[in-house]
Amino acid sequence: MILVDRKEIVELLNIDFRHELEATMMYTYNSFVIEDCDISRLTEAIAADEMRHMWWLADLITKRGGRPSMELGEVEYVGEDIKEGLERQIQKETEGIEEYERQIKIIDDEEVVGVLRHIVDEEKRHRKEFRERIERL
């Protein structure tokens, strides 16, 4: 199934935008409370990447006549267990990758697909970096 309707594409991009907003909030907060300097700095840097993804998605949304949605879902912040927090961050990256890859298959808009592919590459790198930090714990 290919989506060519601009409205449907905007709706999908807004799902992505909200997920990036949630990741930005989660990672920013987690970077404040994680005591390990390497893990907290990595989490902070990835929060900045997620915010950049929001900018890219907002650009795609507004170019197609939409408005970015700032509605937040539930954000799961890190608790006392750093490993558990990293595992949740890995899960967040995996969920994003799966959603982007699903959308790439159904969206018939070269610009959108190009941006989504680039984001997928970055999310895979984030997931790898979080996994590497778990291995060091």
Image: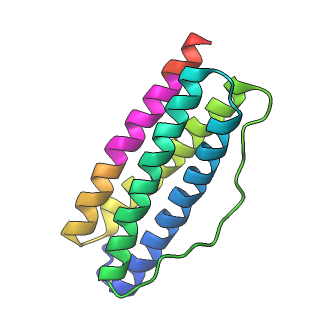
Q: Is residue 123 left or right of residue 74?
A: left
Above-or-below relation of 22 to 43: below
Image quarter in which the N terminus is found: bottom left
The residue at 36%/81% (across/down) is 62
The image position of residue 101, as x and y in percent, is 37, 53
The residue at 64%/21% (across/down) is 36
Residue 92 is covered by the magenta coloring: no
State the image quarter where residue 91 is shown: top right
The residue at 42%/70% (across/down) is 13
The image position of residue 24, as x and y in percent, is 55, 52
Span highlighted in magenta in the image: 120-131
The reply to whether residue 60 is in sight is yes
Above-or-below relation of 34 to 57: above
Above-or-below relation of 4 to 123: below
Above-or-below relation of 101 to 124: below
Give the camera-side residue of 1 and 88: 88
The image position of residue 61, as x and y in percent, is 37, 77
